[in-house]
Image (cartoon, rainbow, N blue to C red):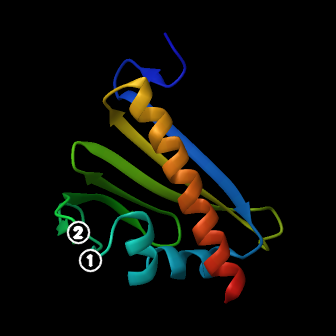
Amino acid sequence: MPTGLTKDAGWQIGVSRTLPHPVPVVWDFISSSEGLALWLGPGAVLIPERGAPYRTAAGVTGEVRGYRPADRIRVTHGTTTVQVALASTADGSRTMLRFHQEHLASAEEREQQRAHWQRILDQAAAVLDRQ
């Protein structure tokens, strides 16, 4: 099977970066209205309970599939599923921020989304470094 193609979730992509900030700082940003607008889309407001619907300003709809504070958010996003997850380094001073998206349509969409999530990581890192 080609890289990124799974039996159950179709095409998927995951990107991550370790940021020089502790989990509470990264969580506060990524779950804030500014953070949600960055990775999910402008206008997105999440109610932190399974099954809660949301809609972005661009008209993308989805629902919350999982929401564990300071750990992860999992949502449907159109026809795909997106998860943002955080993990602390051993000393607690840094956080690995990871985006994972599954149910992508093709290898081409996978590569487009890889570039997209890398840009999101760049932007998140820039915002957090300014705080």
Marks 2 & 1, CB-CB < 8 Å contact:
yes
Q: Identify which residue is drawn at 67% across, 89% down.
A: 131
Q: Secondary structure at mark 2?
A: loop
What count of labels does the image hold? 2
Q: Is residue 91 left or right of residue 110?
A: right
> Is 103 placed above or below 64 here?
above
Q: Amino acid at mark 1?
A: Gly
Q: Residue furthest top?
A: 1
Q: Identify which residue is drawn at 30% across, 73% down.
A: 48
Q: Position of residue 53 (x, y in %)?
A: 16, 65
Residue 89 seen anywhere in this rendered image of the structure: yes
Q: Position of residue 83 (x, y in %)?
A: 42, 53
The residue tagged 1 is: 43
Q: Secondary structure at mark 1?
A: loop
> Is 128 placed above or below 13 here?
below
Number of the label disc, if any, that sits on residue 68? none
The residue tagged 2 is: 56
